[in-house]
Amino acid sequence: MNLNCLSLAKYKFTLQTEEALTLPSFKGSILRGGFGSVFRKIICVNKKKDCSHCLLKDECIYPYIFETPMPAEFTYINRNKISTIPHPFIIEPPLGKKEVYEPGETLFFNLVLIGKAISYLSYFIFAFKKLGEVGLGRERSHYKLLKVEFFKTPSQRELIYDSQTQTLKKVNTQIDISQIFSFQQLTIDSITINFLTPIRIKYHGSYTSYPAFHIILRSLLRRLSYLLYFHCGRELNIDYKEIIEEAKKIETLETTIHWIDWERYSSRQHQTMKLGGFIGRVNYKGKMQRFLPFLKTGEYIHLGKATVFGLGKYEIIER
């Protein structure tokens, strides 16, 4: 298993409002939308709406980040089983429901970068700095990007950018995946997974609200394998059939799951999109050791669809 070949980095962005700012309770869509609009204006030189006909598409950062093209030599997985390539970034909005920010208040969000996208961190910082000058929300309220920190560990951060110096420190921000494998040595026969933002997983062609463990693992392994292949240039060499059969032996105990509907308006597609999913807690019982490295990695890369907005976030509570 070469899970340690997955390149990951996680950052905390702290913003300070300069005007009254009103945001929706779930802020992932507005942060992603604002960032995407500014990012395109910064990067695109031809100002084309359709990147597929642009002469520079193979070298341009924008289509790689937002519209990663299918490689011509793609043979790793059956083409018919994947319609879109997962994006190499995730915006994690604050989980609180606060909607109104007064001038001078701070708010933050996390950004996860995967594989090649880590080398483009400076573009992400510049875009979010520029977004503060353009304005965020319906009122186009301005903010200042105060600082950016990277996560050395889940609980330890280090400053790499601040508004005073406006310089980016050149340090290795990549997460040491090998530390996750230490969990494989533990004897754990039950865990609780707390699904924090809507989880959108398709099983047998439709979105499921029943998080059986093998369904969770199937979705996670699929996402891991795609991220590894398309953004890190490696394959996840495991026996999928065998590990899924083992996952089916894990029991589902107490659940406190419910479905919530969430909508966002896509300015690119000019339509409202429904992005509901399930949230809540589930207790699982069984031999968990071999699954923990995947599950712990999933805490960084999220689960299911629409992860760029922050959907699919969960945390593991070992018992």
Image (spheres, rainbow, N blue to C red):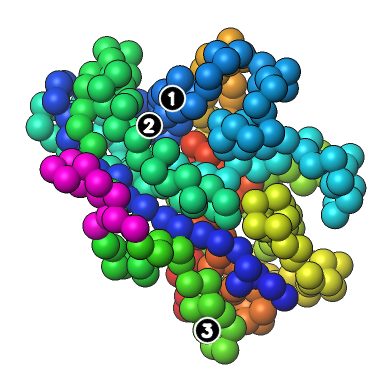
Label 2 and label 1: CA atoms lie apart by: 7 Å
Q: CA distance from mark 3 to mark 2?
A: 37 Å
Please tell me how crowded label 3 is: few (under 14), some (14-19), or many (20+) other residues with Cα within 10 Å: few
Which is more N-terminal, label 1 or label 3? Answer: 1
Mark drawn on residue 127? 2
Q: Which residue is mark 3?
A: 182
Q: Quadrant of residue 6?
A: bottom right
Q: Which residue lies under the disc numbered 1?
A: 42
The image shows residue 287 at horizontal and vertical percentages of: 66, 81
User: In the rendered structure, does residue 167 fall within the stretch colored magenta?
Assistant: yes
Structural crowding at the residue carrying mark 1, measured as other residues with C-alpha within 10 Å and reported as few (<14), some (14–19) or many (≥20): some
* Res 137 quadrant in image: top left
Name the residue: 67% across, 28% down: 57
Nearer the camera: disc 2 or disc 1:
1
- What SS does tag 3 mark? helix
User: In what element is the residue under mark 1?
Assistant: helix
